[in-house]
Image (tube, helix red, strand yellow):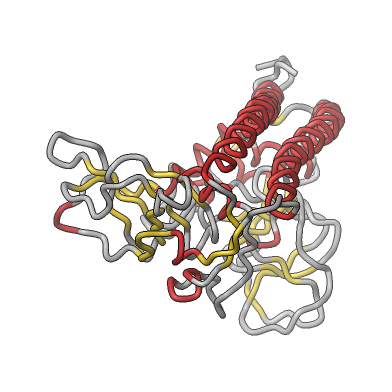
Amino acid sequence: MKDGWERKRLGDVCDFDKAQGIHRGLPYVGLEHIESNTGRFIGSVEPLPVKSSTFRFSTEHVLYGRLRPYLNKAIAPDFEGHCSTEIFPIKPSPEVSRDYLLYWLLADETMERINGTCTGARMPRADMNEVLDFDFPVPPLAEQQRIVGVLDEAFAGLATAQAHAAQNLQNARALFESHLQSVFTHRGNGWIEKTLKDVCEEIFAGGDVPKDRLSEERTAKYSVPIYSNGEKNAGLYGFTDMARVTKPSITVSARGTLGFTAIRGEPFLPVVRLIVLIPDDKQIMLSFLYYAIVGMDFGNTGTSIPQLTVPNFKESKLHIPSLPEQKVIITQLDALAAEIQNLARLYEQKLAALAELKKSLLHQAFSGEL
């Protein structure tokens, strides 16, 4: 630690007002209004109807979300209002810069320590009494302000770089989607309109998860993958010892990540109403069916939960050319998809590197190395 820095108990340099009340006519801040890891407010300052007791805060507070603290939600508001009781208003003393405290709360090391105080498995909450007992690095106020200035400038540059990388990633994906739409919109002569049920041997939805025949890891006994709705890890849910699908097929997420489409080449078990399509290979090639479905528009077909249903999905229309022409189109789309994936990988690596740089800067700031 640098000369002149002190370590103090957080509760000795910060106050937390636990008084709750009904606060009308003020902006409300819930956890959903705080962006993870950035200290950015993403809500509205318009007053909302008050339904329950909340905490009052001012422009002197830092708001810290104690529910699921691993989400790392904290802001330094520039307005007065009231907040959810899952958010703690922390008021630093005059010897502590509010922005310095905010950056400290957003640092990975702090988040990990706070996570260690949590109770509750499904809805973990930080024990703020323990957090107030944490030791807190307190350099002179001028040094705090210098650190905040360096971090502000660095993070502004990082935010711009991240925005550019994210936009480039989005543009790369949009390029592929545009080309895909063009293929199926500007079709040639001889393309025939069909429905999905016309070109598939089977279309059906997955059933219940086999709780008594389930493993989270692949084992000698449980080696058959289970797929459900969702894009994360390509929808992999776990493993079992029985396969419902043994032919090459397409799966389409019918709820949640609506329309996420994947080619499945090995035997598997679909669950939770994941839609499975087994193509009639005399009419349509597996990869052509995949690209045709990826190019479809999946709107909100449900009420509270967007979802697809097998009866409606079967009637979805598509146009198909001859098998030789399908093969040519697949080759072209595969090549473009590979290029786009390479670009996406580069942009994702850049975003990951920028995130790591941000973590490193915060570590340096509170260890006296910045």
Q: Position of residue 320 (x, y in %)?
A: 58, 54
Residue 136, image quadrant: top right
Which is more toward the observer, 113 or 321? Answer: 321
Which is more toward the observer, 336 or 205? Answer: 336
State left or right for residue 209 relative to residue 198.
left
Q: Position of residue 149 (x, y in %)?
A: 86, 31
Residue 15, image quadrant: bottom right
State left or right for residue 187 relative to residue 68.
right
Residue 167, image quadrant: top right
Q: Which residue is drawn at the image coordinates 66% and 32% (left, top)? A: 336
Q: Which residue is drawn at the image coordinates 40% and 61% (left, top)? A: 274
User: Eyeballing the image, is 21 above or below 3?
Assistant: below
Q: Judge whether residue 137 can be spotted in this image.
A: no
Which is more toward the observer, 66 or 210? Answer: 210
User: Eyeballing the image, is 127 above or below 101?
Assistant: below
State left or right for residue 229 relative to residue 156.
left
